[in-house]
Amino acid sequence: MKYAFYPGCAVHSSSKEYGDSCKAISRVLDVELVEIPDWNCCGAVDAIYSYKPLYSVALDARNLSLAERMGMDIVTLCSACYYTLSRTNKLLREDSGLKNKVEEALSSAGLNYNGGVKVRHFLEVLLSDVGLEKIGEKVKIPLTTLNVASYYGCFLVRPPDLISFDDSEHPTSLDELVEALGASKVEYYGKIRCCGASLGITDEEVMLELSKNILLNARDAGANCMITACPLCHFNLDAKQKDIGLKFDLEIDLPVLHFTQLIGLAFGIEPKELGLHKICVSPKKILPQYVRSVA
Amino acid sequence: MQHNVPHEKDEPSEGMKLVASLTSKGDRSSFVKEVMKMLGGENILDCIQCGLCAGSCPTRFAMDYSPMQIIKMMHLGMREKVLSSSTIWVCSTCYTCYTRCPRAINLTTLMMSLRNLAIKENLVDKNGVKPKFHRSFFEIVNKYGRLHEPELFTRILKKSDLRSLFHNAALGWRLWRKGKLQIRAPKIEQSNDLFNILEKTSEEES
């Protein structure tokens, strides 16, 4: 299993541990991720699109074109990149006028794209191509002490005409994964509510309110940790958890891991290699006894 | 059988007076036509005002008009009110409204298109945080090929707001201690590709 890996900007900066843990579990599962040479930012949903839509689509088409040269499908870790790359693919397929303009822009950079690349999220690859059975076989330390609230957020499950590997309203993929690792899943309505995304930069009060509701909902439903599948969701729920506590006078103290870190823990991979020390709300107290003694 | 349709010679209702005073028929149809050409706005006339979008919207509490009202306002040709509303900027583009809309109106994508139009037409304060975010994001990515997070933060930060400066410095410190702050800017090798793409697409987007 070989894929063109598109890490996305956050995985190279504020979410390095997401990429590190992804690589660590990929080795165990025989998944080969070849980073797309010289990839560029996808445009981040609306960040560039709202300012220069055509440029944003063309920018993204450059990534698709580079992956097409490699002859592999794109796999990304970031839900926002997953959505944005998928959208570009769809727009180029359906809008011939736009396609012509983008082709012209690409050719000015000596590139072309024939529409032959599929865009996939790493979670989808794990579930569809690797399979839960194989993942279950690799579990060395069943995570029986963990009650995990899986957070899906937005672009992992929406919009359904673009992203359809899981249900938009009642997604279960992460929960199935949690159970395959020996942990218990936690049901809570906040799992598909928006964390506030980039409003964290432009409208922080709104973002803090949204993320607070999700964290409290997960905790009240009995979770002792959460997992995410997007660096931005993770940033808002983990790195900003302190700000949420300060604003609302709360002590939430709910560790939030990248889902790849949870898999790595169950596989018996060293916590350091998984970058657990980079999580802002320390997950030490919830780690299984065996792992804690190593960490 | 009795109908509640007012007869031509009847006085127009209060509601009708309000609508009529806002926009002329010509304005209404021209704005609807304009929106229907935008990405996401293709079928706004299919809206039945059921309110699922407004009820599902996670950021409704911070908007001046609900997503449902924005659609109605587009029907009524209230171009400037729509484009200068806080709604189009507070939308977090979570796609819940589109997912649930029984008439498959892609309001989320339309919000992005409306932002673009509002920026183009100067209907939003150029120095406000929102347009600054989009412009800075674009400039940073066009320069390096990738996002440089600290630069985005420092560009948007209001230097006069001490509380916000202190708050963000604390966040920066927290991230730095965890090795999550990338001080050095990234740079792709073929950054000329992006300049060429910009040059080509600019002819279209000016």
Image: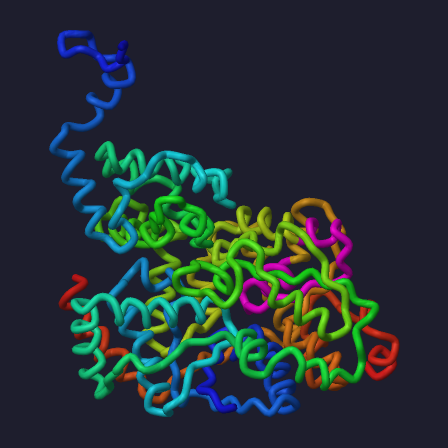
> With B176 as the anchor, is B154 left or right in this view?
left
* Furthest residue in direction left, as rendered: B26
Whether residue A228 is in magenta: the answer is: yes
* Point 41% across, 37% down: residue: B66
* Point 64% across, 85% down: residue: A25
* Point 56% across, 89% down: residue: A31
The stretch of residues the image draws in magenta is A215-240
* Furthest residue in direction front, as rendered: B1
* Point 60% across, 52% down: residue: A211
Give how far across and how far down residue B157 sits, in percent: 47, 57
In the rendered view, tell whether residue B72 sits above or below residue A289: above
Give how far across and how far down residue B163 sits, in percent: 57, 50
Give how far across and how far down residue A72 sits, in percent: 41, 88
Q: Is residue B124 visible?
A: yes
> With A99 as the anchor, is A199 left or right in this view?
right
Give how far across and how far down residue A92 sits, in percent: 26, 71
Whether residue A245 is in magenta: the answer is: no
Residue B191 in which image quadrant: bottom left
Residue placed most toward the observer, B150 or A106: A106
Quadrant of the image for the C terminus of chain A? bottom right
Q: Is residue B182 visible?
A: no
Total tally of numbered discs in the picture? 0
In the rendered view, tell whether residue A142 sits above or below residue A240: below
